[in-house]
Amino acid sequence: MRIEKLTFDHKELLYERLKKIDTPVSEYSFANLYLFRKNHDYEVVFDEEIFIRGKTYDGSTYLMPAFDVRNADVAYLKGMMKNADFFFPVSEEWLSVFTNGEFAYFYNENDTDYLYTVEKMCTFKGNKLHKKKNLLNQFMSLYEHDAYPLIETRMEDAYAILEQWQEDMGESREETDYYPCQEALKLYDDLIICGGIYYVNKEPGGFIIGEEMNDETFALHFAKGKKKFKGLYQYMYNTFANILPKNYQWMNFEQDLGKMELRIAKSSYVPDMMVKKYRVKCK
């Protein structure tokens, strides 16, 4: 077994490998792993298979298989579990591998990804999203608004938005995802991510950055907007959903990390699916 600190040099090893797993789970992305490598102290574990070893926000050590565990030998997986507290994140589809009575599995609600249909975000249709629809309509009537692809010539505007967003948050940069988002802007093309940038009355107002998780799911890694523009986030989500290629059926807003403000915000859009990420260990 060989263990290396996760660096950008591992992109060639991991990018396509993770894409082939075909899961909506937000951790299965090289960009996500790299940008949050310091938060989770990520390492690459080289054995018969490739694993990522990291630390959860609640202080446990885990192994993340960089392959579909349904194609692996169960005895081998059991042996590898000795190198961490548990396997994580394990999708519900993978639990069928761990049903011989030797394993226990559980999940932390804070880790669960929020998924919404693209159609829902395109329309905000229905009584439960009536307030979102109203906010969108108010925004569009109050402000002059423009949406563009986030490309190199608009990066300075995105940096300015990020700085204002951080100031609006009223927290230290270490308490938010400021640094990972800043690095995402810096390495935007290298990480093979994409997004949109939004202007309000000609002023840079907000941006979205994400990437494809599988053929049906697009994950939003970052959504940043200036607090002073009421309805801006509804406008960004709606506008972005409407320009996504038709093959995408789902938008993954990722987890809330147990932060109540995030939980309330993400729940208010009424998720169509909550993707649980299980922790699996030997009994």
Image (cartoon, rainbow, N blue to C red):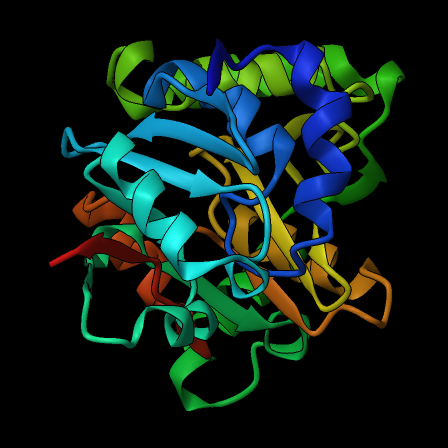
Residue 116 in the image: above or below residue 193: below
Residue 56 lies, in percent from the top left, at 25, 34
Asked whether residue 136 appears in the rendered view, the answer is yes
Residue 83 in the image: above or below residue 238: above
Residue at 66% of width from left, 12% of height from top? 8
Query: Toward which corner of the image does residue 235 lie, by quadrant?
Result: bottom right
Residue 218 lies, in percent from the top left, at 67, 56
Residue 123 lies, in percent from the top left, at 65, 78
Q: Nearer the viewer, residue 128 or 77?
A: 77
Residue 274 in the image: above or below residue 210: below
In the picture, measured across the screen, residue 255 lies left or right of residue 235, that is: left
Position of the C terminus, as image quadrant, is bottom left
Residue at 76% of width from left, 29% of height from top? 202
Residue 52 lies, in percent from the top left, at 46, 31
In the picture, measured across the screen, residue 80 lies left or right of residue 180, that is: left
Q: Nearer the viewer, residue 178 or 238?
A: 178
Asked whether residue 164 appears in the rendered view, the answer is no
